Structures are given as structure tokens and as C-alpha cells.
């Protein structure tokens, strides 16, 4: 790696990395995302989440140069987007100790290496690993928090094998608007509607279509959660929205041509993602683990794969 | 899609879809399967299971035309077999509400799309997704029933993390014959030996070999469950039989040439499937989820893969 | 298969099979491994583990000839290494009944067939299945022990959904040396530091590099477990060491060229494996299942994949 080149490109690379979490290779979108994270984290009185995001972003991006990975990826910010999410997640769920911070650095660097491998794994189907490197590595480190007293799983929900559902009782329209906006903010694990507004603006700066799909997808998730009477606390926290938002942006505004047919299929993908989200919440309850953005990865892969004949067979026919 | 063609082919397509659950591209087998489902469901006093099967079959087949998938698949009934199983499973485990029925329609349609993707995923190894689209989508919707009060997991077994095994005490030969037949009936989640008889007849109409392997496999599963002293309630319900039956038909009467060597290997695959079944029952107990036909998919993939060199490498060597 | 050839090659094949557990295609290493297993098992007063290892080794190797698999694999001992581990694991966790022994034979034979399939599955990425056939099949049979009273899961840890971590209090240096050596012995599920010494010697006979990486990796795991204050009982048993040891030998002394850069990356892989180990311990706690060598397989695949572009895409570019 050339230090000069590293020094030159990396600040922008990092902002692009933040933007790439929602598929936007755009410096300003990334900057607004980070501003939204800081505002939300300080409103929540959890500054460690904001600083963790910065550390994760820097470490994962620098790691790409140290590992000597192709710099074309780095230039598009494809090294940092998993790391920034790791930086949001670990301080959200684990005790704020020096060992947690060391683990955060290890985990963030790991995502950059793991992403290259997962992309090789998915290469035959011409689909990428999305945020799954973040999901997989973070799951490992969060679960490790149940074995390591040095980074105890202090803020993870207690494991339960059975529980009752307490659906939402009547709320004001203004409440629902907040839940809808929180659905967007939770992409970065931020529980604040103000951050949701900033994120929608950040998307619009780069792509109107992406901003619209983010809003519509969070709305679909909210309406479904109400119709099927989902756990009220999840609805209030916007926890049905974030994966739906990412699936919506991916299918509706990133990978498929914007035809009517594709838009309907993308909306179907968002609906499927909401059911997958509910399923993963129940599946992970006995270990008290958050589903993170796994429902988005699974839902988007499932809906993209039917159109992705592996290069293999075509190669042999 | 051409409405004309759709109207012309789909009734037969649907019957073939029912038959394809046990690998029989045969209208009469499919018809007898549906008759067996209705008789069994009404004997069990669970008519919603029978009607759910019909709805799932129709929706998943129609979905194939709407999604514009290759009609050659539709003509062989390869769109409907996952959907009919979804239609049997959801009313069996979830509360009978309007939201469950809407979920059933969404889930059945989803299987048709997901199947195409899973087949692309498995294409390099020249193996198909079998009933796994049904398994995966149904798992999602059943687990969602633990989060959505609108389609509560009313009839799913309660999650348990530990329990004692109550093996079967002495029973009459006639009892064992019923358990053996139920093993075949449970392929469609029907707990009735009469349905088991109808299913065996339905198979014989299309293929003697398939009928014999179904019977033999259910017998192997029953004998093993008794020798290893499995949970009595599972044996009585025929719950060790259905996946073994499908593995037996797949390996013994569908994909491998009927040599002695292959027949012994197929029987070994059936034995392995019974252990995988027991393992999945224990694995899924903490979330109170049924293993559905996953043990069949896993067992059959595991035993077919050694003979399926990926087209990739051959393509490159 | 030719009986003559079988009789001629198999004794050596079997010793090589024992050696291949730690990637050593060496008769003497295999012999010392078996000696270490017997000494450790008898010290632990668990002779069935040692005899199980022998049975598993013989059955899985003979199975390769019976299945008619390519004998080049057999000659390198690639049929036996999963079987010997099955033979160590089942008597360790299941009740010592005739049905357990029959299950052991079925499971050991199954690994030889399943390995061929898993290798086909991984062929596009030019990586092998390592000990995962052992892990997968053993998981199935151990979990089946919770459903089958005939081979009850007598010695598996009770399922728990929540527990407190009791880190290690002060110990003598000699204690730590024992834990470090046990980390190596646990590769074959042996809880004895003496066996650890024998295993290190066995490795040195075949490869100094492998022996050094085994020792270093077990040390890294021990130090990390202490720094992050892992469950004391796991540290005392050397249960953080064995997967790290295998990852270290695989990345540091088997698959990658021994450059400084690669050595640092291999050490990073060992660190990652320790976190994955902790995660799997927590993940499997609700079903009281041991993680076996899965953390090694996952960690090593994750770290090798970034350098393994699938042959597919290269084939099409």
C-alpha cells in the first residue's frame, strides 16, 4: 500500500463508507449519516455509540489498506460500511469497558477481511454480501459477551423461551409518524425520529428514489406490524422498519430497473422481509440476540436470486 | 402470460403440483393426494387444513404465471407442491384468523418465487431445492406467529429447553400398522392411517417403486424409533416417518438407477434421515418449531452430493 | 474394490487418518495421536473414548472402500480423520449402551460419504470440508441422544438459557501450563495435559512448524480467555484452545506460504477463532450441545476465502 495514496483518499473513502450502508456512494450522504448518528446518540445519552461508529469506520477502512485489498473497493467506500455498523452495535449491547473497545477494533477490522471472502462465496451468483459481514461478526462478538465477563452482554435482552405479545393500544398520529421515522433511524441502531429525518434528507441528497423507497418501506413495515398486531415495544422502537428500509432501497432503488413490475416485486420483497424480521426476533429470543440487518440480507438475497442464474451453468451449457 | 394458456393448463398443473410433493408428475396421484388430505383433515376435524391446502396450491401455481416464470416448470406442477404444503402447515399450527389466511396467501406465493432462487443457488451441483422453499417460508411464518398476535402460534408446541423421553410401552400389531401408515400420511401433515393408505395407493398409480420405497422407508423409521426408544408421542403420530418416506422415494425411486448397490445406499440415506429427524426435533424444541420436511431435504442433499461434482470445476479442469 | 489392495493399504491408511486430524499425512504422528488418546482416556477413566476412537477410525476407513470412493483419498488417510473424532465424541457425551455403539458405527461410516459431498459443495472455492463432516454428523447424533432413550445424552451439559460467568481466580504458573497443554489435547476431546505433550511431540515428528503453531495458538487462546475473563471452567478444561490450535496449524503451517505477512494474518485468524468459539458456546447453551471443532472450520474458511476466487467467475471472465 502507498501511504501517500492512503492519506489522500481515505477521508472521503470513509464518508463514502458511511453512505454505502444504504447503498449511496456519496460523501455528503455519508457526512449527514454521521451527523444523524451523533445527534441521535447524544439525544439517547449514548455517546459511546457515536464514537464507536467513528472508530469502526476508521478501523475497517484502514484495515482494507493494511490487508492489501483492491483499492477500487476502498475508493467506493466498500470497506467502511460494515465497520461503522459494528461500531454502532457493540457499544449498544455490550458493557463499556476497555476490552469491549479492543473487541470493537478487532471486529471492525475482521469485517473488511470477511467481506472479501463472503463476496467470493457469493460471486457465482453475482450478488454481494451486503451487510452480512457486519451481521455475522457482530453476532459472534455479542454472543461472546455472554461468555466474556470483560465485555459483558450488559444491554442485550435477557434470553427467554416463551413470552406473551403485548400489541400496541391506541396512539396519536404524531406517535405513528415517530415510529415510522425511527424505522429509518434504526438502520444505524439509533432510536430517534430526528435522526430518521436526517437520514431521509441524506438519502435524498444522493437519490430521490432511494429516499422514497426508504420512507415507503418503513411505512409498509409499520402498517403490517399494526395489522398483524406485533409486539408493541418493537413497533414503538421502529424495530420492524430498518431491515424493510434496506430491502426497499436495494430492490426498489439500486439493483432492479425501475419498472412497474419490478416495483411491485420489490414491495413484495419488503413484505417478505417484515415476516422474516418477525421470525428472526422469535428465533433469536432464546439467546437474547438482536437480528441486526440479517432479515434485509436474507430477504434481498431471496428476491434477487431468482434472476441470478449462476455463471457456472451458463459456462457449461 | 397468456390468460388463455393459463386457463387451459392450470387445473392439471395444480393436480400435478400435488403429486410432485412425492416426486410424481401425475394428475391422478395428485387427485388422490388431495382426496386423502380432505378425508384425513375432516376425520381430524380440522377442515381448515384441507381448504388451506387447496388455497396454497392454487395461489402458488397462479403466482408462477404472474411472476412470469418459465411455464415448462408450471406444466410439470413444479410451482404448486411447495404451496400445497404451506396450505397444510399454516392452519395446522396457527390460529384460524383472517390474518392467518392472508399470511397463507403471501407465504404460498412467496414459495414459487423463492424456489426459483434456491434452484439457482443449487444449480452448480445439479440438485434441486426439493421442498425446502416450503420449509424455509413456513418456518418464517410459523415463527412470526410468536410475534404477531393476529396469527398467534396457537397450536405450536410450547418451547422447552429440557424434557424427559417417554418411550412407547407395549402396543398391539394393529397399533404399529397405524403408526407405520401415519408416517406416510404425515408428509402432508395429516395424522390419519386411512390417509396413509390412500397416499400409498396414489403412489402406486404412478410408480410401484415409489410406493414400495415409501412403505419400506416408513417401516425403517418406525423400527429405528422403537429400537432407539424414541419419544413415544412422536412414534404414535408417525412423526419419524414422513421425512424418511420422502428420502426413500427420492434416493430409491427417483434420482438413482435401481441397482442393488444404490438401493443399499438409499436405505442408508433413510437411516441417516431418521437420526437427522431426531436431531432437528431436539434442536427446534427451545423454539417449539416443527422440523417439517427439512430432515428429508438435508438427508437427500447429503447423500446425493457425493455423486454431484459441481459443473464449475469440471468446467475449468 | 480389490480386497487385496484393501488389506495391504488400510493399516497405514488408518494411522495416516489419525494424523490428518491435524493435517499431518504421517504414520508416526497418527500412531502417537492414538497412544495419546489411550493414555489420556485411561487417565480420565473413560476407556470407551479410546476404544470408540479406534472403532470410528476403522469403520470410517473401511467405509471408504465399500462406498468405492477414490482410493487416492484413502491412501492419504482422508477417510479416517472424521471417523476417529466421531469415535471420541459419542462415548464422551452419550450413555455407553449397545445402541450408542451401533450409532457410532453408523455415524462414522456416514462421515466418509458426507465428506465427499461437502467437498463437492466447496469445490468451486478450492477449499475442503476440514473436520466439518465430523461436526455435522456428531451434532446430529448427540442431539438425537435427547430424543432417543436408547442412547441418552447422559454426559451432555444441561440446556440453559441464562447463566452467570465465573472467571478464573488466581492460579499457579503450573496450572496455566496444564490449561495450555489441555488446549492441544482437547482436539481429540481429551482432558489431560500429558496427552497435550504427546500430541505436540507427535506434530513435531511430522512438522516443526505445525508443532510451534499448535503451541502458540493454544497460548493465544489461553491469554485471550484470561484477558476477557472467560468462564473459568472452560479455561481449566482447555476448551478455548482446541479450535484455535487447528486454525493455527491450518493457516500458519499448512495452507499459506510462511511469510511474515501471512503469519500475522494467521494469528489474526486464531484470535477470530477464539471469539467464534465463545460465541458458539453461548449459541449452543440452550440445547446443551458442544461446539466441537466448528469454530475452527468457520474461522479457517472465513480467513481462507478472501484468497479463493471461485473457479466459476474466473471461468467466465
Image (cartoon, coloured by chain):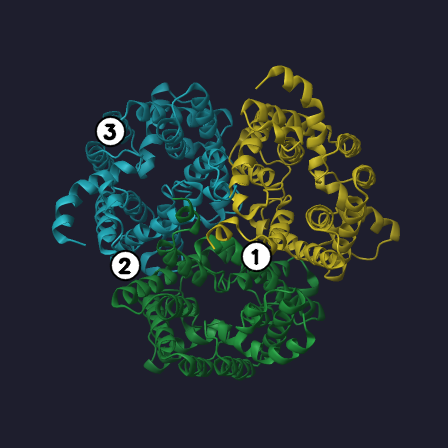
Chain colours: A yellow, B green, C cyan
Sort mark 1 into few (<14), some (14-19) or many (20+) by Cα contacts within 10 Å: many
Residue in the picture at 29% in, 48% down: C91
Q: Nearer the viewer, mark 2 or mark 1?
A: 1
Identify residue for label 2. C99
Q: CA distance from mark 2 to mark 1?
A: 41 Å
Q: Secondary structure at mark 3?
A: helix
Residue in the picture at 55% in, 69% down: B72
Judge by depth and name the residue closer to the eye, B280 or A65.
A65
Relative to C278, residue B34 above or below: below
Percent across and percent down for residue A204 are: 82, 40
Identify residue for label 1. B117
Q: CA distance from mark 3 to mark 1?
A: 48 Å
Chain of the residue under the numbered disc 1 shown in the image:
B
Q: Nearer the viewer, mark 3 or mark 1?
A: 1
Q: Secondary structure at mark 2?
A: helix
Q: Is residue A126 left or right of residue C27?
A: right
Percent across and percent down for residue A118 are: 53, 40
Relative to B129, residue B314 above or below: above
Q: CA distance from mark 2 to mark 3?
A: 33 Å
Judge by depth and name the residue closer to the eye, B224 or B168.
B224
Chain of the residue under the numbered disc 2 shown in the image:
C
Percent across and percent down for residue B187 are: 47, 72
Residue in the picture at 19% in, 54% down: C1
Which of pointers 2 and 3 lies earlier in the amino acid sequence? 2
Q: Secondary structure at mark 1?
A: helix
Identify residue for label 3. C202
Chain of the residue under the numbered disc 3 shown in the image:
C
Task: Determine if residue A167 is in view.
Answer: no
Percent across and percent down for residue B236 are: 42, 73
Sort mark 3 into few (<14), some (14-19) or many (20+) by Cα contacts within 10 Å: many
Amino acid at each position: 500500500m502507498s501511504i501517500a495514496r492512503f492519506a489522500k483518499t481515505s477521508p472521503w473513502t470513509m464518508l463514502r463508507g458511511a453512505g454505502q450502508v444504504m447503498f449511496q456512494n456519496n460523501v455528503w450522504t455519508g457526512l449527514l449519516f454521521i451527523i444523524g448518528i451523533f445527534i441521535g446518540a447524544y439525544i439517547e445519552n449514548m455517546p459511546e455509540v457515536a464514537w464507536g461508529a467513528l472508530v469502526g469506520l476508521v478501523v475497517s477502512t484502514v484495515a482494507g489498506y493494511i490487508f492489501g485489498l483492491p483499492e477500487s473497493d476502498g475508493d467506493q467506500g466498500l470497506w467502511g460500511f460494515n465497520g461503522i455498523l459494528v461500531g454502532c452495535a457493540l457499544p449498544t449491547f455490550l458493557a463499556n469497558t476497555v476490552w469491549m473497545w479492543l473487541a470493537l477494533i478487532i471486529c471492525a477490522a475482521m469485517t473488511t477481511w470477511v467481506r472479501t471472502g463472503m463476496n467470493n462465496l457469493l460471486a457465482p451468483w453475482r450478488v454481494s454480501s451486503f451487510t452480512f459481514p457486519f451481521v455475522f461478526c457482530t453476532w459472534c462478538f455479542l454472543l461472546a459477551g455472554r461468555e466474556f465477563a470483560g465485555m459483558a452482554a450488559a444491554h442485550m435482552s435477557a434470553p427467554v423461551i416463551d413470552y406473551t405479545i403485548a400489541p400496541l393500544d391506541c396512539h396519536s398520529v404524531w406517535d405513528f409518524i415517530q415510529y415510522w421515522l425511527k424505522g429509518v433511524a434504526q438502520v444505524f441502531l439509533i432510536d430517534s425520529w430526528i435522526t430518521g429525518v436526517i437520514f431521509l434528507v441524506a438519502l435524498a441528497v444522493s437519490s430521490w428514489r432511494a429516499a422514497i423507497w426508504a420512507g415507503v418501506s418503513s411505512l409498509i413495515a409499520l402498517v403490517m406490524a399494526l395489522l398483524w398486531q406485533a409486539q408493541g415495544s418493537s413497533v414503538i422502537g421502529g424495530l420492524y422498519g430498518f431491515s424493510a428500509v434496506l430491502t426497499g432501497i436495494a430492490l426498489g432503488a439500486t439493483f432492479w430497473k425501475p419498472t412497474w413490475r419490478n416495483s411491485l416485486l420489490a414491495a413484495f420483497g419488503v413484505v417478505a422481509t417484515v415476516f422474516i424480521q418477525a421470525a428472526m426476533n422469535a428465533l433469536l429470543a432464546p439467546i437474547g440476540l438482536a437480528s441486526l440487518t440479517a432479515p434485509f440480507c436474507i430477504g434481498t438475497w431471496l428476491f434477487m436470486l431468482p434472476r441470478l442464474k449462476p455463471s457456472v451453468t451458463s459456462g457449461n451449457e
